Amino acid sequence: MKSQVKNSLIVLMLAVSFSCTNISGPDKSVEGTILGAGWGAGAGAVIGNQTGSLGPGAAVGVAFGAASGLLTGGGLDVQEGFNIQQQREINSLQVQVAANDVELRRIQASLDNRQEGIISNPSGTRIFFDDGRASLRMGSAVTLERLADAVKVNPYIAVVEIHGHSDDMGDSDKNQKLSEARAQTVATFLTEHGISSHVIKIIPHGATQPITTNKTPEGRQQNRRVEIVLR
């Protein structure tokens, strides 16, 4: 009995010692297991003392505490992974929303002064895309609809140039085709909203004309784009 008590106390001390250690990294499963073992050992020791089985009580407490901690920690890992992905999507959407705000202000100013001539957009209207995709993202449709409305009421616009771009991830042939597909997506949207296909000109550039660095995720997001220039 004394040997069991001694061993259980050693287990309890080790578990508590580990539970007080600051574990770095995102793995909540490991941290939860250790913290649970420390809690279980203490609870088991208390129960064992009341029943006259201190050693087995602590050992059983360690096992149950570790299992509980592992399940709790695993759940935290899953939640953390979901939060990271959700934050990435929010960051991407914020880029498009910011661009939309600037573009809508410019288009509105052009509509207010359309009698003076052609819409001025030297840098082009920018539509951003997800990695490896050519489909329109949420938030892009509003910008393109406003652009289509502005083009239809302005008789001075003769050409709508749609320049497709990509980041530099992958080989050049793939990026070239991807930039063309993105430009075609925008062209299709504009024709469906009343712009004649005869005035639309698609110009794919692949990854040859970045507007910022491709070394960061934020930079690559800026480079995955279509620019619409009115002439």
Image (spheres, rainbow, N blue to C red):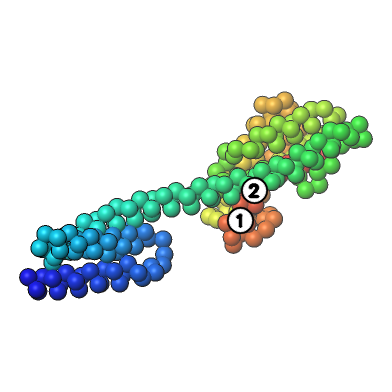
* Direction right: furthest residue: 116
10 Å neighbourhood of mark 2: few (<14), some, or many (≥20)? some
Q: Quadrant of residue 117?
A: top right
Q: Quadrant of residue 128?
A: top right
The answer to whether one can see residue 164 in this image is no
Q: Which disc is residue 35 wearing?
A: none
Viewer-proximal residue among 157 and 123:
123
Q: Is 231 on the left or on the right of 17, as rendered? A: right
Q: Quadrant of residue 146?
A: top right
| Sequence-first disc among 2 and 1 | 2
Q: Could you tell me residue 47's position as x and y percent?
A: 17, 59
* Direction left: furthest residue: 1
The residue positioned 13% from the left and 66% from the top of the image is: 55
**Which residue type carries mark 2?**
Val
Q: Callout 1: helix, strand or loop?
A: helix
| 212 w.r.t. 159: above or below | below
Q: Which disc is residue 218 wearing?
A: 1
The answer to whether one can see residue 39 in this image is yes
Circle 2 residue: 95
Viewer-proximal residue among 215 and 179:
215
10 Å neighbourhood of mark 1: few (<14), some, or many (≥20)? some
Residues at circles 2 and 1 in contact by the CB criterion of under 8 Å: yes
**Which residue type carries mark 1?**
Glu
Q: Callout 2: helix, strand or loop?
A: helix
The residue positioned 57% from the left and 38% from the top of the image is: 135
The residue positioned 72% from the left and 38% from the top of the image is: 201
